[in-house]
Amino acid sequence: MVLINSIYTRTGDDGTTALGNGERRSKYDLRIDVIGTVDETNAAIGVARLYLDGDRRLAGMLTAVQNDLFDLGADLAVPQRDGRAERLRIVAGQVERLEQDIDALNAGLAPLTSFILPGGSPAAAHLHLARTVARRSERLLVELADRPEEPVGAPVLQYLNRLSDFLFVAARVANGNGVADVLWIPGQNR
């Protein structure tokens, strides 16, 4: 259980913040940037959920993703080092559940004949925005993982890679199972 008694601590007034293991990092540190961008992804998904118009199945999947993103942030907040006792980590089962959700949502969609412009319904537009933030999270995470001194678990990388795919398919579902998708027309405005 998490217990938060005070919202402000003043410990970050010097431009640093603490990881879950107590280590202090600059607020512009790459690991902190990844954690913050994952949080931004989560917030964008929360906004998208406001526009789902009663789609309980999709809302449930998105809620599960939001919880997973908190797990992912907790995973990143305590870097895996020296065989220490494990903390909360993203596990393969979470990646597999996300893949199953992608497959379940995609099963009801017609194959694409063009790329899709972000838009359509309000829910879909917000899910597309969440998708782009998730991709930014992934790019930053890959940069972090490329640093030998910054360990990142493989399931974290896999989860963020699948997440943007899930959000893309979810946006199509929110667009009436693709009916309201806005298709790209190459060279339309030449």
Image (cartoon, rainbow, N blue to C red):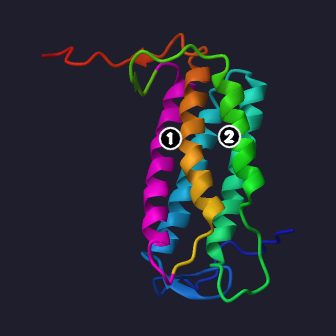
Crowd band around label 1 with a 10 angstrom C-alpha radius: few (<14), some (14–19), many (20+) = many
Which residue is drawn at the image coordinates 82% and 72% (left, top)? Answer: 3
Question: In the image shown, does 119 or 142 lie closer to the viewer?
Answer: 142
On screen, residue 43 above or below 74:
above
Q: Secondary structure at mark 2?
A: helix
Residue lying at the far right in this picture: please name it.
1
Residue 138 lies within the magenta run:
yes
Residue at disc 1, secondary structure:
helix
Quarter of the image where the C terminus is located: top left
Relative to 16, residue 113 above or below? above
- The residue wearing badge 1 is 131
Q: For the point 60% across and 22% down, which residue is it?
A: 174
Can the viewer see residue 146 in this picture? yes
Number of the front mark, 2 or 1: 2
> Looking at the image, is mark 2 or mark 1 earlier in the sequence?
2
Quarter placement of the N terminus: bottom right
For marks 2 and 1, give the CA distance.
Answer: 15 Å
The reply, left or right, for residue 39 in relation to residue 69 is: left
Residue 9 image position (x, y, % from top left): 64, 81
Q: What residue range appears in magenta?
A: 120-149
The residue to which callout 2 is attached is 99
